[in-house]
Image: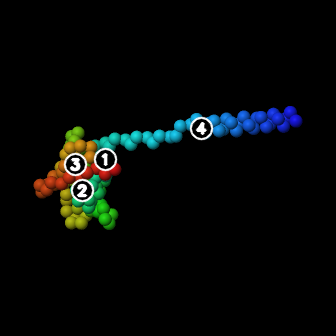
Amino acid sequence: MTIARKLLSLGAAASLLAAAACTTTEPSQPLPAAAPKGVEGNWIDAKGTGLSTFAAGKFTTVATDTGQKLSEGSYTMTGATSVEIHGTSLIRQTPVSFNCLMVSTSQLNCTSAAGQNFVLTRRA
């Protein structure tokens, strides 16, 4: 009987420890999102028709409704808040060139080589 009692006591103690471990752990907290770095990330035009992705010196723009690639190329940060973009319009098969100013972490004000102005907004 003493062996049975010892096993029963040991089992009860193990159960209590396991239960205590479950109730004392805190829920995991999500890590805060990293702050955007420069123009890296996704940007959408004011009409919501084109989504541009900037990563590692390259950019692509796709149509938001069909996913069709509209343009691609490269970009260079020319200052802390300014960027030059050069590429090709895949629809027109012509070169594209833009200068943009990052007025906030979520807004790029851009001007094309032809003088057209447009705004891109960072997308989460």
Q: Amino acid at mark 1?
A: Glu
State the residue position of label 4.
Answer: 23
Residue 14 position, x and y percent, is 71, 36
Give the quadrant of residue 73.
bottom left
Q: Which mark is residue 108?
A: 3
The crowding category of the residue bearing disc 2, from other C-alpha atoms within 10 Å (few below 14, some 14 to 19, many at least 20), is some
Up the image or down, 103 lies above or below 3; here it is below
Q: Earlier in the sequence, mark 4 or mark 1?
A: 4
Give the left or right position of residue 85, taking residue 7 as reference: left
Q: Which mark is residue 45?
A: 2
Give the left or right position of residue 109, taking residue 16 as reference: left
Q: CA distance from mark 2 to mark 4?
A: 49 Å
Can residue 120 be seen in the rendering of this structure?
A: yes
Q: Amino acid at mark 2?
A: Asp
Q: Amino acid at mark 4?
A: Thr
Q: Amino acid at mark 3?
A: Leu
Q: Which mark is residue 40?
A: 1
Q: Earlier in the sequence, mark 4 or mark 3?
A: 4
Q: CA distance from mark 2 to mark 1?
A: 15 Å
**Residue at point 56% right, 37% down?**
25
Give the left or right position of residue 60, taking residue 12 as reference: left
